[in-house]
Amino acid sequence: MAEHGFTAEIAPDGLSGLELALSGKFDAFLLDVMLPGMDGFALLQEARAAGVETPVIFLTAREALPDRIRGLELGRGDYLVKPFAFSELLLRLNNLIHRAPTFEERVYKLGDLSLFTQQRKVYRGAARLDLTPQEFTLLELLLRHGGKVVTRARIAEELWEMAFDGDPNLVDAAVRRLRRKMDDPFSQKLIHTRRGVGYVVEPAEG
């Protein structure tokens, strides 16, 4: 990795990896799912709970959809199935690290829904919604488009920084999880499906 401008530290097991992750000194994590002591999913979940938002690439031999979803839903990450080309890993790593952050606080409002971009808080009325990083990113994306339909391809690119592979299951599963938290408990539904195209947020079906 050094010849490509990266300096790496290696952890032999999950617990050591968590200790490194919590140090806050890394630009990105390359995280194997099958780690001794604590698997990669549990490691990242602990790091996210502690407020660590460092982007991650999961390296794994698993390619079943539930495993892909479990890794990606933790937020700010990518997923690479073994075997993979080293050039692809470098490209994805550079994309994660050099993605420009934004520090301007913006507030999106729709009906009784409010989203605060920098505080990373979402409310429906007075009720605060407990969203994962991925769910927050998805909702912000939909709100940014202001009532316009967002395609599945655009959602896949924003959430996972990857090209849409034609399988809608991954995107649809992410939307279902968001709906359970921000729509199901409330009478007014805000997320609507445009069949064959994508999703839109608006106060009522139009």
Image (cartoon, grey):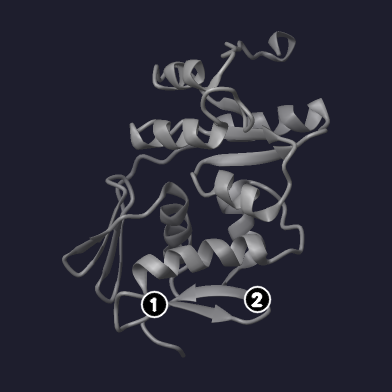
Residue furthest bottom as drawn: 206
Q: Position of residue 48 (x, y in %)?
A: 40, 36
Q: Looking at the image, which residue is at 41% across and 54% down?
A: 136
Crowding around mark 2 (Cα neighbors within 10 Å: few <14, some 14 to 19, many 20+) is: few
Quarter where residue 188 is shown:
bottom left
Q: Is residue 27 above or below residue 132?
A: above
SS state under label 2: loop
The label number, if any, that marks residue 197 in the structure image = 2
Quarter where residue 171 is shown:
bottom right
Front residue of 132/191: it is: 132
The label number, if any, that marks residue 144 in the structure image = none
Q: Position of residue 65 (x, y in %)?
A: 68, 54
Q: Position of residue 46 (x, y in %)?
A: 40, 33
Q: Is residue 54 above or below residue 201?
A: above
Q: Looking at the image, which residue is at 40% across and 50% down?
A: 132
**Residue 149 visible in the displayed image:** no
The amino acid type of the residue labelled 1 equals Leu
Front residue of 191/148: it is: 191
Question: How many marks are shown on the rendered structure?
Answer: 2
Residue 138 placement, left or right of 160: left
Q: Position of residue 25 (x, y in %)?
A: 44, 16
Q: Looking at the image, which residue is at 63% across and 35% down?
A: 58
SS state under label 1: loop
Q: CA distance from mark 2 to mark 1?
A: 17 Å
Residue 50 placement, left or right of 58: left
CB atoms of marks 2 and 1 within 8 Å = no
Residue under pointer 1? 190
Q: Looking at the image, which residue is at 75% across and 37% down?
A: 61
The amino acid type of the residue labelled 2 equals Val
Quarter where residue 96 is shown:
top right
Q: Quadrant of the N terminus?
A: top right
